[in-house]
Image: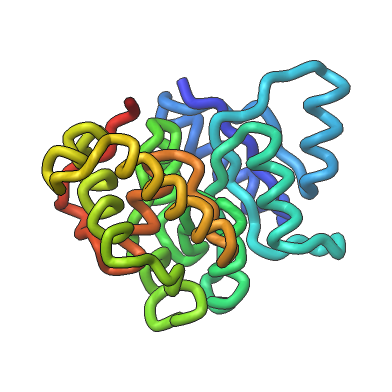
Amino acid sequence: MTRVALIDDHESVRLGLEAATARSGLSTVVFSGSSVAGYLSWLRENEESPADVIVLDLTLGDGTTVTGNVSDLTAAGSSIIIHSVADRPHSVREALAAGAAGIVSKAAPIDDVVAAIGIVGRGQPLDNVEWASAVEGDRAFADAQLSARERDVLRLYAAGLPLKAVADRLGIAYSTAKENITRVRVKYVEVGRPAPTKIDLRRRAMEDGLLQETDGAPRDE
């Protein structure tokens, strides 16, 4: 059962999502509120574990920033789905760069939101039209300036190969492959697109056109 938190300053949106998640039988809403601060206070005051997935409104009416909200929630230990009208591509890209797992449009059927919760709750990347359009054509977002070797290592590693297999495939030492992945992560952090997990690296490789959705699947080592 995926534990879900809903943060949106429109009560009607939260009520609709609560009802939909209850119908699915696969998720349970543990928190519903209008602010990130309210959620974090709830965690502290009740000594609760963080929700597995948080469905977060892109822009809350409390003066907070997209980057601040996503960063605070991911630091608390949750995966973030942005629930947005999807007409603010810059803000969407900002949310993704801060570590959000993906985006679902508020114009999408509510069952799509429930499905996205399940996907992200299982630790899988959320790759949909809204997510793709948010990064398409944005050179500043996409350019981590990886070297040819780093791109080769990332492509194979993000496709699901263990680092040792990547090293063998490329004819390099394991330590060299590991150093390349470390440099890749550093470069993505430097352009505001952190990739701390293998799934995050897969997402970055797809964003940069190094990998297709059908190319393997990441496995933790």
- Name which quarter of the figure residue 213 lies in: bottom left
Looking at the rendered structure, the number of numbered marks drawn on it comes to: 0
Colouring rule applied to residues: rainbow
Judge whether residue 216 can be spotted in this image.
yes
Q: Residue at x 75, y 56 (%)?
A: 68
Q: Residue at x 17, y 35 (%)?
A: 165
Judge whether residue 115 can be spotted in this image.
no
**Side of 10 where 15 appears, left or right:** left
Quadrant, the C terminus: top left
Q: Residue at x 48, y 51 (%)?
A: 185
Question: Is residue 212 shown above or below 171?
Answer: below
Q: Provide residue 29's location: percent of width, then percent of height.
A: 60, 30
Question: Is residue 105 shown above or below 12?
Answer: below
Q: Residue at x 37, y 49 (%)?
A: 180
Question: Is residue 23 shown above or below 34?
Answer: above
- Name which quarter of the figure residue 79 lies in: top right
**Side of 195 where 65 appears, left or right:** right
Q: Provide residue 184's location: percent of width, then percent of height.
A: 43, 54
Q: Provide residue 198's location: percent of width, then percent of height.
A: 38, 40
Nearer to me, 91 or 28: 91
Nearer to me, 140 or 62: 140
Residue extending farthest to the top is 47
**Side of 198 where 164 appears, left or right:** left
Q: Provide residue 86's location: percent of width, then percent of height.
A: 52, 71
